[in-house]
Image: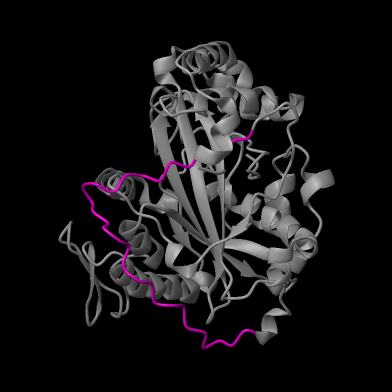
C-alpha cells in the first residue's frame, strides 16, 4: 500500500496512507512559498533556531461548542476539471484550530474504544525511541483540550477528565496504564502519528494510533522512512511531481508553524474503521480488486480527511492528526453545487490516478447519479456563476 494522498492527487485510501502526503505537499508548499506573498512572511531558518522551551499557545474556548449540536465542518475538497492537477494543497492554520471535535464525537469515541479492545496491538504502537514524544503529545492534548472544549474536558492535577464519558486519565503516573498514544486517541476523533528524524536525517514513522483509517494498517508502515513509504506504493506522479524538497521542509519546520490540508475519496461500503469492500483487514493484500462493481448509490460514501502537521518543541518530533469525515454521498449532494463539482473532479482524474483510486468500480453508478442531481439543481434555478460567493474551497 502506498501512502500518498494529495488534495488533487487524492489516491484511494485503500492504496495509500495519510501521513506522507502531508509531508510531501508541505514540501512543495515550502518550495513554492517564495512565489506567495503570504508565505514569504513565514519562511524559516533552520530548526536549531526554535527554542526547546517554546510554549504552544493556550486556545480560547470554541464558541458555542456542543456535543449535541455542533455539526461536522462541511469540507468538500474537490475542484472542477477538466484538467486534473497535482497541487500542494497545504495551508497555514491557527494554533487554536489544531483539533476539531463535533457532535459525531460519541460514535468516534465508541468505535475507537471497540478497536482498542479488539485490535489494540495492531492499531496502536510506540517505538521505545518515540515514547518521550508520545508523552509530549499527550501532555499537549491535556493542556489544549480543556481550554478549547471546556464543556467536554477538565484539566486535573494528574491529567485530564472527559466530562461526557466519565473517564479520568492520570498521565503523570509511571508506568502509564496504557500506551500514551492509545490514551491520546481516546480523547479526540483523530487518528494520530509521530514521525522522528533518524541519524541519517530522514524521518521515520515511530508511533501511531491508527484506529479509523479505513484503508491502511499501522503495522505495515511502522518504522519506515518517508521515501520508502512512497516508493513502495508506486504512487502516481510522486517521483516527477512531489519528491523534491522533502528533507528541506522537515529541517525548516518550526514549532510555531502549523499546517492543515484536506482530501477526499469514494468508498463503497459504510465502515468507518476498516473498508471491508477492499478485503479483510488481516489479509496480506488488500486492493480495489475485491470491491463489488456498480453497487447501488446508497452504498457510496464520501470520505474526507482533515490533516494537521506540527512539530513538538521538546522532542522535535513531527505530529500528524488525521481526522476523518464520513458521509453518504446521498447526503452531501443536497448541498448546492456539490454534485456538479464532484462529478467534474472525478472525470478529471487521469488514467494512473483513476486506476489507483478504483474509479472503475463505481463510476458508472456514481457519475450518473451526480449528473442527475446536478441537473435538478440547475432546473430549480441554481446560478453556477455565483458559486464562488457561496462556497470557499475546500468548503
Our reading of the magenta stretch's main secondary structure is loop
Q: Is residue 65 at least partly visible in the picture?
A: yes
Give residue 237's quadrant in the image.
Answer: top right
User: Is 104 covered by the magenta stretch?
Assistant: no
Q: Position of residue 197 (x, y in %)?
A: 65, 71
Q: Residue at x 46, y 78 (%)?
A: 56
Q: Position of residue 393 (x, y in %)?
A: 57, 43
User: Is 72 covered by the magenta stretch?
Assistant: yes
Q: Specify the farthest residue to the left.
A: 166
User: Which of the pair 65/158 is nearer the observer?
Assistant: 65
Please tell me whether residue 51 is drawn above or below residue 387 in the rendered image.
Answer: below
User: Which of the pair 195/222 is nearer the observer?
Assistant: 195
Position of the N terminus, as image quadrant, is top right
Q: Position of residue 392 (x, y in %)?
A: 54, 44
Q: Residue at x 75, y 61 (%)?
A: 36
Please tell me whether residue 215 is drawn above or below residue 207 in the rendered image.
Answer: above
Find the magenta span and give its range: 50-79
Q: Position of residue 62 (x, y in %)?
A: 32, 62
Q: Specify the farthest residue to the right.
A: 240
Please tell me whether residue 327 is drawn above or below residue 376 in the rendered image.
Answer: below
Q: Residue at x 33, y 72 (%)?
A: 142
Amino acid at each position: 500500500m502506498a501512502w500518498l494522498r494529495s488534495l488533487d492527487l487524492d489516491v484511494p485510501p485503500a492504496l495509500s496512507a495519510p501521513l506522507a502526503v502531508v509531508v510531501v505537499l508541505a514540501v512543495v508548499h515550502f518550495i513554492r512559498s517564495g512565489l506567495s506573498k503570504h508565505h514569504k512572511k513565514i519562511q524559516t531558518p533552520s530548526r536549531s533556531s526554535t527554542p526547546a522551551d517554546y510554549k504552544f499557545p493556550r486556545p480560547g474556548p470554541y464558541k458555542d461548542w456542543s456535543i449535541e449540536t455542533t455539526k461536522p465542518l462541511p469540507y468538500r475538497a474537490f475542484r472542477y476539471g477538466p484538467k486534473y492537477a497535482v497541487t500542494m494543497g497545504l495551508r497555514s492554520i491557527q494554533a487554536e484550530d489544531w483539533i476539531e471535535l463535533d457532535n459525531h464525537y460519541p460514535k468516534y469515541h465508541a468505535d475507537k474504544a471497540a478497536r482498542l479492545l479488539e485490535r489494540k496491538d495492531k492499531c496502536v504502537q510506540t517505538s521505545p525511541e518515540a515514547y518521550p514524544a508520545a508523552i509530549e503529545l499527550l501532555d499537549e492534548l491535556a493542556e489544549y483540550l480543556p481550554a478549547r472544549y471546556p464543556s467536554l474536558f477538565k484539566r486535573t492535577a494528574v491529567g485530564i477528565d472527559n466530562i461526557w464519558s466519565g473517564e479520568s486519565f492520570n498521565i503523570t503516573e509511571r508506568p502509564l496504564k496504557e500506551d500514551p498514544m492509545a490514551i491520546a486517541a481516546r480523547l479526540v476523533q483523530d487518528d494520530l502519528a509521530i514521525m522522528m528524524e533518524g541519524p541519517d536525517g530522514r524521518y521515520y514513522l515511530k508511533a501511531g494510533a491508527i484506529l479509523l483509517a479505513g484503508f491502511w494498517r499501522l503495522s505495515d508502515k511502522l518504522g519506515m522512512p518517508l521515501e520508502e513509504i512512497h516508493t513502495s506504493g508506486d504512487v502516481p506522479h510522486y517521483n516527477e511531481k512531489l519528491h523534491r524538497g522533502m528533507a528541506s521542509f522537515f529541517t525548516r519546520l518550526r514549532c510555531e508553524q502549523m499546517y492543515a490540508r484536506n482530501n477526499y475519496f469514494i468508498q463503497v461500503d459504510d465502515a468507518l474503521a476498516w473498508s471491508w469492500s477492499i478485503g479483510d483487514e488481516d489479509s496480506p493484500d488488500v486492493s480495489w480488486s475485491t470491491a463489488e462493481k456498480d453497487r447501488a448509490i446508497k452504498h457510496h460514501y464520501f470520505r474526507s480527511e482533515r490533516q494537521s502537521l506540527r512539530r513538538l518543541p521538546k522532542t522535535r518530533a513531527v505530529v500528524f492528526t488525521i481526522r476523518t469525515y464520513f458521509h453518504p454521498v446521498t447526503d452531501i449532494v443536497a448541498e448546492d453545487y456539490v454534485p456538479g463539482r464532484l462529478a467534474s473532479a472525478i472525470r478529471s482524474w487521469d488514467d494512473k490516478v483513476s486506476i489507483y483510486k478504483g474509479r472503475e468500480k463505481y463510476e458508472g453508478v456514481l457519475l450518473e447519479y451526480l449528473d442527475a442531481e446536478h441537473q435538478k439543481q440547475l432546473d430549480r434555478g441554481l446560478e453556477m456563476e455565483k458559486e464562488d460567493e457561496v462556497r470557499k474551497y475546500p468548503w
